[in-house]
Image (cartoon, coloured by chain):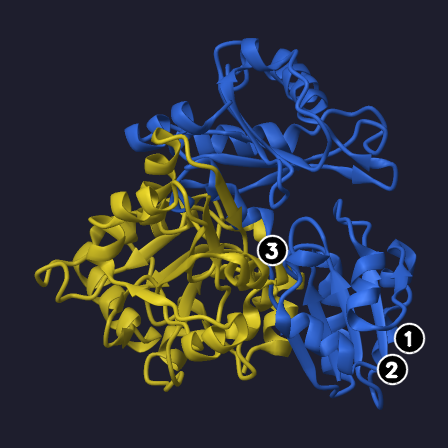
Chain colours: A blue, B yellow
Amino acid sequence: MLTLAGLGLFDEKDVTLRGIEAAKAADKVYIELYTSVWHGKEKLEQLIGKDIEILGRSGMEQGSEKIVKEAKDKDVVVFVPGDPLIATTHTILIEEAKKLGIKLQIIHNASIISAVCETGLHVYKFGASATVPFREKTGGKLPESVYETLKKNKKNDLHTLLLLDIVPEGGMSATEAIQIMSSLEEKKGDGMFTDETEVVVYARAGSDEPLIAFGTLAEMKNRDFGEAPMVMIVPGRLHFTERGFLEKIGK
Amino acid sequence: MLTLAGLGLFDEKDVTLRGIEAAKAADKVYIELYTSVWHGKEKLEQLIGKDIEILGRSGMEQGSEKIVKEAKDKDVVVFVPGDPLIATTHTILIEEAKKLGIKLQIIHNASIISAVCETGLHVYKFGASATVPFREKTGGKLPESVYETLKKNKKNDLHTLLLLDIVPEGGMSATEAIQIMSSLEEKKGDGMFTDETEVVVYARAGSDEPLIAFGTLAEMKNRDFGEAPMVMIVPGRLHFTERGFLEKIGK
């Protein structure tokens, strides 16, 4: 059997009882940590009483066949950050397993996609989300599709969740994301991301020290939001209860 | 301190270690079960070694002040289905606690909002979501805003997640939601929900027996999808990898 188990948002305490149980019973346990910032591999190993092998991007993408074959006559658990299958790269495992007729189990967990409601923004008012990539990854090109997504959502009065990129060295800060979005605004000029635009920064979701910051870009662009992971939301039209909540809770 | 802890999708095994730990250490533990279908209160009581008091809708909405005051000099945990704060009713607790200067902790967990990616649909292609209410609740009126949301999303090639209503007697089936949506189509006539429209039904997320069903309305409208909880997705334009996944995984 192949089990894909979510790690949740922050550390080993975010794993569910179902996830711990599956890993304890497993013959082999893998962990994928390149799609998100997550802490606690060593403590998780202590909790389940066995070693966990780290899967790099190539291990997940080129090694999927090997992992799935291993699951033919062994119980294999693959831990992934957040909720499984949010990162489309994980669907490879499911398709391979289905092809070989291997039993599958998905253990869900918290994802930033829903955790973001801690900001008081209403879940049904989020439009399509987008990821802001590091400039190094796009060869210096600006991610125009992100701006287009924002524009479409704004037109429909919807919120835009901007997920921030990650590299092995760490996650993007909201400050860097603001710079990239501001460069896009300069280029496109449709007034989607100006000094008056209000944004929400939500950092370290699920940790003991989460931060919810709310303000105009002019107020936010020089702020230090601390350590990654973080996301940025560009709200559509705010309902008065959303604004009230943000003004009370946001720091 | 007031802790709002997510219960996850299905039963007590979906609770995180952080949630169990908080409840074990708490002076008082409440549970809210009216916003979702969730199983396992008794087993959760065994796990944490104490009784859990059930909060009805009135207990949550009118009793919030009492709960928050109790959290002034006691550790109070309130368990809620899925990920906290997805149901806007829970934000009342946060605002009351903030007003009284009471320390707050949010323990995130799995939500249907992200679990839905188990269907292979890409998370960034979901537009705004909507809830299909029981006809009894709307005085027989059709929920036209749901149709409007669907229309906007379709125009932007985005997927629409339809959450299905719940009453104390149980959750709505996709079959009933299809009937309501079809009546809306009859009334509005914009071709958003016809016999040729493809839909995905995702039932019993997080359980040992989840169902992912994919087909046209003509194929789906007379099917029995089993027990609630379930959701229905009306996809926008499907990426070929999404279609490939659904055709392989969907039953």
**B39, B155: nearer the viewer:** B39
The kind of residue on which mark 2 rests is: Lys
Mark 1–mark 2 CB contact (< 8 Å)? yes
Which residue corresponds to the image point at 39% horizontal and 25% vertical from the top-left? Answer: A248
Which residue corresponds to the image point at 27% horizontal and 53% vertical from the top-left? Answer: B60
The kind of residue on which mark 3 rests is: His
Q: What label sits on residue A66 in the rendered view?
A: 1
The kind of residue on which mark 1 rests is: Lys
Q: What label sits on residue A69 in the rendered view?
A: 2
Q: Chain of mark 3?
A: B
Number of other residues with Cα within 10 Å of mark 1, as a class: few under 14, some 14 to 19, many 20 or more = few
Rendered location of residue B243, percent (x, y): 60, 66
Which residue corresponds to the image point at 78% horizontal and 74% vertical from the top-left? Answer: A77
Height in image: B175 above or below A119? below
Q: Chain of mark 1?
A: A
Height in image: A184 above or below A34? above
**B250, A201: nearer the viewer:** A201
Q: Calculate the distance from the C-alpha at mark 2 to the C-alpha at mark 3.
A: 26 Å
Number of other residues with Cα within 10 Å of mark 3, as a class: few under 14, some 14 to 19, many 20 or more = many
Residue position for label 3 = B122
Q: Calculate the distance from the C-alpha at mark 3 to the C-alpha at mark 1.
A: 25 Å
Please identify the quarter of the rendering in which residue A85 is found: bottom right
